[in-house]
Amino acid sequence: MLLLLLAITINSCMEKKYEWSASISAPREYPIEVYTGAAGGYFFSQMGGFSNSGWGGWGSIDFIKAPLPDRLDMTWLSYVDDKFYTGEWELPTEKIQQLFDEGFYAKRGQEAVTEPYKYIKIGFAPKGMVVVWAAGISRQVEIARFQAHETIINPKLISKDEKYMFRNGYSQHRLENNFVISKDVREQLEQYGYPPSEVYEEYREKYNWKPKVVLPKGSTITSMYIKMCNGEMEDPYDLPIDQQNRAIPFSFQIFWSVGSGKQKQEFVSRIAFTHDKEYWAKYLEGGENEIPVDFNKNQIRKLFKEDLDKNKIIEMVIKINPNVEIKSERVTELYLEQDGKRYEIKEKVTRTGKYE
């Protein structure tokens, strides 16, 4: 027995430690508040447990030096559902450790560098759906999907500091707060309605596609950020980009240059699939570009879901010309191509300008 205890103690002491952070996220239109929870040695509570940062978005970042989490235990309040959900799950530890040990390649200028994964992100969708991602500065990948169940908190376990969450009408009162649901999101919800809760599961579906960017002669892509509707993000280091299964993209940011030396000019082309004409203006004012509230109704989803064969190769062609006078029209061509047939993407917001 003593030998067994000694072996367990030694194994615990030898367990590899990483510098990592955990954060929570929720769709901007489906905000939540954590009651209590933990991801390994990282703990959450109702104090600071609110999130409406966007699906797969960033939360607070406080790092700890500890073994990577092997379990996830969360209880939270969904304001829109007006219900508490709870669940406890085993995380795919080997998969997480492999990602953190290997990191990922990212393109910086003309060089490929190794970047680390340092973040565990926990996303709460409607009806108790939970998705977990591993993230670095320029890449984010899904590592698990879980389903929680509704719960009722035992009143005897509620402390004095926690009682505010259980007041009658608390969820509705929070939803009327402009900090919880911003004026911008509120206006979009009035126009397009709430996305059905099941779309966050549908967003996880993947298709065999890749982007093909056509630039003016002599131009070079320096970096590209692709954000997908399933919360994943990619910064391809190898160009041209490889063909692989990806979720439907909701935005691109393409950084590119033309010329060299003193004649070199740098540009950025931004594309988002939304009806919101002010989408990039809001981003440039200072904020993260999040999945549009109306994305579930956008044309690009219909094309992928109804018009294209998910098992066949799909290419998204993006042609850019900075000499067009109007910035929003410098993406001159944007279409999906499969088996020689073109599918024009008309519902999008683009912006191309010099990058300084």
Image (spheres, grey):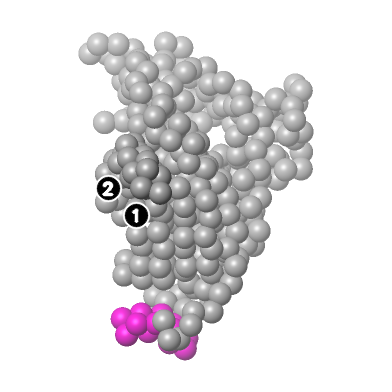
| Image quadrant where residue 104 sits | top left
Residue 323 image position (x, y, % from top left): 43, 24
Q: Residue at x 61, y 27 (%)?
A: 244
| Amino acid marked by disc 2 | Ile
Is disc 1 in contact with disc 2, using a CB cutoff of under 8 Å?
Answer: yes
- Residue 216 or residue 212, whichever sits in front: 212
Residue 160 makes an appearance in the image: yes
Residue 351 makes an appearance in the image: no
Residue 102 image position (x, y, % from top left): 41, 26
Residue stretch in magenta: 158-170
Distance Cα–Cα, label 1 vs label 2? 8 Å
Give the number of callouts: 2
Q: Main secondary structure of the magenta part?
A: helix
Q: Residues within 10 Å of mark 1 (few under 14, many from 20)?
A: some
Which mark, residue 64?
2
- Relative to 294, does residue 204 appear above or below in the rendering? above
| Amino acid marked by disc 1 | Tyr
Secondary structure found at label 2: strand
Magenta-drawn stretch contains 300? no
| Quarter in which the C terminus is drawn | top left
N-term mark: 1 or 2: 1
